[in-house]
Image (tube, grey):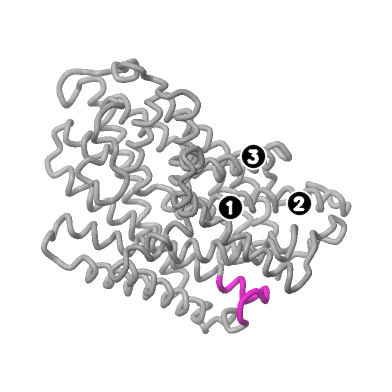
Amino acid sequence: MIALGGSIGTGLFVASGSAISKAGPGGSVVAYVGIGIMVFSLMTSLGEMATYFPVSGSFASYARRFVDPAFGFAMGWNYWLNWVITLAVDVSTIGLVFKFWFPNSYGSLFSLIAFILIFLINALSVSSFGETEYWLAIIKVITVIFFLLVGFLTIVGIIGGHPVFGRNFTYKDAPFVGGLPSIIQVFLVAGFSFQGTELIGITAGESETPGESIPKAIKQVFWRILIFYVFSIAVIAALIPYTSQNLLGTSASDITISPFTLVFKRAGLAGAASIMNAVILTSVLSSANSGMYASTRMLFSLGVNGDAPSIFARTNSRGIPMPALLVTSIVGLVIFGTSIGDSHIYTFLVSASGLSGFITWLGIAISHYRFRRAFVAQGHRLSELKYHAMMFPLGPIIAMILCVVVIFGQDVDSFLKLDWQNIVISYMSIPIFLVLFIYYKVKYHSKLIPLDHVDLSVHK
């Protein structure tokens, strides 16, 4: 359920419409399938490592052990920064969502109440975090299933008037609009939509039975996520032409023109916007809750590995890393405060985490490639692994290539126009990662670990 909750959110409920408007119905489906296959390959890579080494903050630990300590240091701090900023963005968005129902209220007050609630959930116990994510995810899953059912009945004309079938798939330039460049653009939208699936790796260290639960989550849940996205986009594209201005919404404030809202309205469902606003609220709460958990566990992992002050490696009697949780919460609150005080600083901070998720995915692919090669080089047999990643070595290699394409293809238009301000904003994550990497290299003189020296001892 954490895997489902991590990737079903505003990317599907609102921003999926912009993908259809850019590449048309066919192009958007192709892009989501392509990115979906890449992410599936990444998750199988992560699953193989997470079942063999189930540790909190897994990505940084794997990069440190299998590639280079400097790479692990940079990946860990990069991921922590990404999620702590995401936490602040989500908390700020909660205020916008409440504005839909209470337009004259102070949105920041609702945001602050939500922040305190999320902190208490994470401070209580890891099971309270898991239980919360379970129920928030169920609401989203039920919404998508209900949407697909209503959408299908509307397409065939059982409800909502005349049937449309595949009419909009051949409307004007559909199904493929803008050719390959548009599909690559939608790769970015699809990639951001799938961000969060890697949370499976973070939770492995606190899973009761990682050897069974992690492979199960990757095998079963991921394909359901992919089906949810592809089928939902197909329903939206069938009912709303790609030329509709209503498909251009991208944030939670665009709930009244969410493709889900429009489809429900067409089916005659009263109060569609209010219902979807409530669902979006659960999505943003889920994302903020996950952000608090992921950033706290990554800071804990950095403390354990010696890449952060040792105080962050401490836990209380309930196993909660309270120093890491408190510092993460304070930093998150400060960033949230900038959204109220200075929008320019806030925009700068948000752009700083823009590509961090893709950098993490690239790091996972590199770490797994090195892990498997070291595993074989040191005389181990693949039968020793509880879970085998699919398509090795092709899977990690394809994932590396696609991640690099997506990272550097983030804002090609700005390069063509030599718009340096937009280039800096779009690619801020890359220099931050490089500064962290070079800092560690210069200070500790770390080197790429030879395959026969990679530490494969099972973590206790």
The quadrant the C terminus occupies is bottom right
Does label 2 or label 1 sit earlier along the sequence?
1
Stretch in magenta: 299-309
The nearer-to-camera label among 3 and 2 is 3
Q: Amino acid at mark 3?
A: Ile
Q: Is residue 117 left or right of residue 130?
A: left
Element under disc 3: helix
Does label 1 or label 3 sit earlier along the sequence?
1
Whether 267 is drawn above or below 199: the answer is above
Q: Which residue is mark 1?
A: 359
- In the rendered image, is residue 64 in sight? yes
Does label 3 or label 2 sit earlier along the sequence?
2
Q: Amino acid at mark 2?
A: Arg
User: At which x and y percent is residue 198?
Assistant: 54, 53
* Residue at the image point whose x is 57% and y is 74% from the top: 300
User: At which x and y percent is residue 417?
Assistant: 46, 39
Residue furthest front as drawn: 418
Whether 24 is drawn above or below 116: the answer is above
Q: What label does residue 402 carry, if any?
A: none
Q: Which residue is mark 2?
A: 370
Q: Are marks 1 and 3 in contact (CB under 8 Å)?
A: no
Q: Looking at this view, is 32 or 124 the one in front?
A: 32
Whether 103 is drawn above or below 308: the answer is above
Q: Decide: few, some or many residues near mark 3? Use Cα within 10 Å; few <14, some 14-19, many ≥20.
A: some
Q: Are marks 3 and 2 in contact (CB under 8 Å)?
A: no
Q: Which residue is mark 3?
A: 401
Element under disc 2: helix
Mark 2 to mark 1 CA distance (whole Å): 17 Å
User: At which x and y percent is residue 112?
Assistant: 28, 72
* Residue at the image point whose x is 75% and y is 64% from the top: 458
Q: Amino acid at mark 1?
A: Ile
